[in-house]
Amino acid sequence: MIKISVKTAKKREVVDITDQVNEEIEKLEIKDGICNLFLTHTTAALTTADLDPGTDQDYLAAFEKMVPKLNYKHPHDPGHTPDHISSALIGTSLTVPVEHGKLILGTWQKVVLIEFDGPRERQIVLQFS
């Protein structure tokens, strides 16, 4: 098990971490198996996505529309409750197969971290089996 850090630069953004994960697979000399990723935060998410130009903004706009504007009760900071909800809807874990030392992804798929409450430094745990 290893941890990687991802520094986000904006309040909301989509960050491609595919190369960073593949670099760790290469360092560990993993040839075939499963890569489990777990994000240790509640205001960001992990998923796969197509990152053609502009699609990152499409994702962020769609996620913002999915979460209703309510009178939230979160005691810490009700203003970022939608960030927690977006994270819960998308998820904080991802499982991707590894073959020949690389993640198996579709032609347009990338592994992405979606930041909802940045900028921050996010930690992702990688475990291989």
Image (cartoon, rainbow, N blue to C red):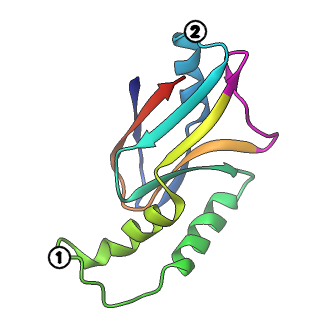
| Chain-order first, disc 1 or disc 2 | 2
Which of these two is toward me, 59 or 75? 75
Q: Secondary structure at mark 2?
A: loop
Which of these two is toward me, 118 or 86? 86
* Structural crowding at the residue carrying mark 2, measured as other residues with C-alpha within 10 Å and reported as few (<14), some (14–19) or many (≥20): few
Task: Please report the bounds of the magenta region as a residue range.
Answer: 98-108
Q: CA–CA distance between discs 1 and 2?
A: 45 Å
Extreme residue in the bottom direction = 71
Q: Secondary structure at mark 1?
A: loop
Residue in the picture at 47% in, 27% down: 127
Horizontally, residue 74 falls left or right of residue 10, namely left
Residue in the picture at 52% in, 11% down: 27
Indicate the quadrant where residue 80 lies.
Answer: bottom left
Numbered label tally: 2
Spot occupied by residue 81 in the image (x, y as percentages of width and height) = 33, 74
Spot occupied by residue 54 in the image (x, y as percentages of width and height) = 69, 60
Q: Is residue 36 above or below residue 56?
A: above
Spot occupied by residue 106 in the image (x, y as percentages of width and height) = 79, 40
In the rendered image, residue 103 lying in the magenta stretch gets the answer yes
User: What residue does disc 1 label?
Assistant: 75
Q: Disc 2 marks which amino acid?
A: Glu
In the rendered image, residue 15 lying in the magenta stretch gets the answer no
Numbered label attached to residue 100: none
Image quadrant holding the C terminus, namely top right
* Structural crowding at the residue carrying mark 1, measured as other residues with C-alpha within 10 Å and reported as few (<14), some (14–19) or many (≥20): few
User: What residue does disc 2 label?
Assistant: 29
Residue in the picture at 63% in, 58% down: 56
Q: Is residue 52 above or below residue 26?
A: below
Image quadrant holding the N terminus, namely top left
Spot occupied by residue 111 in the image (x, y as percentages of width and height) = 61, 42
Residue in the picture at 43% in, 62% down: 116
Q: Disc 1 marks which amino acid?
A: Pro
